[in-house]
Image: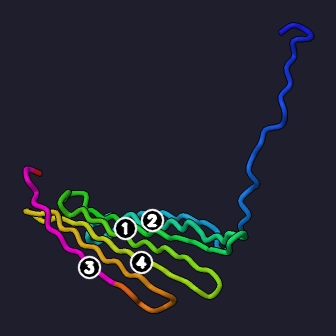
Amino acid sequence: VAIGDEVSFPSPEAASPWATKMIRAANSERHVDRDEKTGVVTLSIVDDFGAVRDLEHDLAHGSIARETWAIHPDDPSSASGKTHWTQTLSRNGWSVRTETFTEMRSDAQNFVLSARIEAYEGENLVFERDFEQNVPRALV
């Protein structure tokens, strides 16, 4: 660029920053445990994504994910997984929450899946449903 060829640009336009208040800080934990008696190795995960309140419309939301994965190193068919998720929303004395649970394991013929969902208004359970499914282990 030659002298006198400089170009200037106006300041960039941007939206206002999101106005929030942290209610609960995010946090993550990971633990690996080995049961010395059985040999089963378990990975436990907790991902707390925190909770935040939007200061413009006052809606607060939060979530926590919990996972457990287990296996015996000498038995691949012993692998199993469990999850438990919590999602929350609240505003001005009103609150709702969902809790979901899943479990995955297998036996010699099937992958065995189970799940549960619970929905709450305040502390009152307003909906619940359980799911069960066996998926044939076709050539697996």
- Give whichever of discs 2 and 4 has the lower sequence position: 2
Secondary structure of residue under mark 1: strand
Q: Which residue is mark 2?
A: 45
Is 88 one of the magenta-colored residues? no
Q: Which residue is mark 3?
A: 130
Task: Give the residue type at disc 4.
Answer: Glu
Query: Gap between marks 4 and 1, in whole Å?
Result: 16 Å
Q: Locate residue 63, reporting x and y percent.
A: 52, 70
The tag earlier along the polypeptide, 2 or 1, is 2
Cα distance between the residues tagged 1 and 3: 20 Å
Camera-side mark, 2 or 4: 4
What residue is disc 1 on?
68
Q: Earlier in the sequence, mark 1 or mark 3?
A: 1
Q: Which mark is residue 99?
A: 4
Q: Amino acid at mark 1?
A: Thr
Residue at image point 60% right, 66% down: 26
Mark 2 → mark 1, Cα distance in angstroms: 6 Å
> For mark 2, does the 10 Å Cα neighbourhood hold few (<14), some (14 to 19), or many (20 or more) residues?
some
In the image, the segment drawn in magenta is: 128-139
The CA span between labels 3 and 4 is 12 Å
Helix, strand, or loop for circle 4?
A: strand
Amino acid carrying label 2: it is Ile
Q: Height in image: 137 above or below 83?
A: above
Indicate which label's residue lies in the foreground, 4 or 1.
4
Name the N-terminal-most of marks 3 and 4.
4
